[in-house]
Image (cartoon, rainbow, N blue to C red):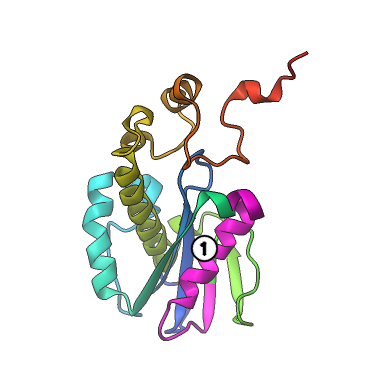
Amino acid sequence: MLLKNHSALNLECGTDEAGRGCLAGPVTAAAVILPESFKNNFLTDSKQLSEIKRDILKPIIETEALTFGVTHIFEEEIDSINILNASILAMHKSIMQLEPQPEFIIVDGNRFKPYENIPFDTIVKGDSKYLSIAAASVLAKTYRDAYMNKIHEEFPMYNWKKNKGYPTKEHREAIRKYGSTKYHRKSFKLLPEQLKLNF
């Protein structure tokens, strides 16, 4: 399915996040305003793209976008304000970087908070429907993956280069064996047995 532009507004931005369900690392959001003429037959929700395709698309989006912004919100702040608020904050900070500022915002998902009185629309599975949200999802994912690859070098035993901080069996086994790190989200259930009480 070919994605389309959401409206005729030239200054409409799409925004999306990556890493919301991870046990370690930041939640990362991007916001993108694409020109009305932008077309790309391969661009879709970043989760449906291979890493190679995302890496090919990243410089195309950065070059052809009218403007874009990317923001990491790190573990300490996620633990302090919760993951939903951190995700929305990352989107707001990404939109803040846009020059010019958008006239309308389209958001992947169903939760958002108003930003600077700019009208917005939340769209479930928006990253597989609209080009600007798909572009934001690719940037958020590639920037976050690059960060996780970097911190993998510091703690290779968790294999973040492969699992990117998601709660895979391998990741949880490493937490069980080595404990948590400064990059783990302390407010998240890192291991299933955290629910059990020790009497």
Q: Pointer 1: what residue? A: 90
Q: Is residue 1 visible?
A: no
Nearer to us in this view, 153 or 171: 153
Instruction: Give the x, y percent position of residue 180.
Output: 50, 32
Instruction: Give the x, y percent position of residue 126.
Output: 50, 59
Nearer to us in this view, 193 or 80: 80
Q: How many marks?
A: 1
Q: Residue at x 37, y 73 (%)?
A: 68
Instruction: Give the x, y percent position of residue 149.
Output: 30, 44
The residue most toward the right is: 199
Amino acid carrying mark 1 in the image:
Ala
Nearer to us in this view, 28 or 114: 28
Q: Is residue 57 visible?
A: yes
156 inside magenta stretch: no
Magenta-colored segment: predominant secondary structure: helix
Q: Residue at x 58, y 55 (%)?
A: 77
Q: Residue at x 64, y 59 (%)?
A: 111
The answer to whether 35 is drawn above or below residue 57 in the figure is: below
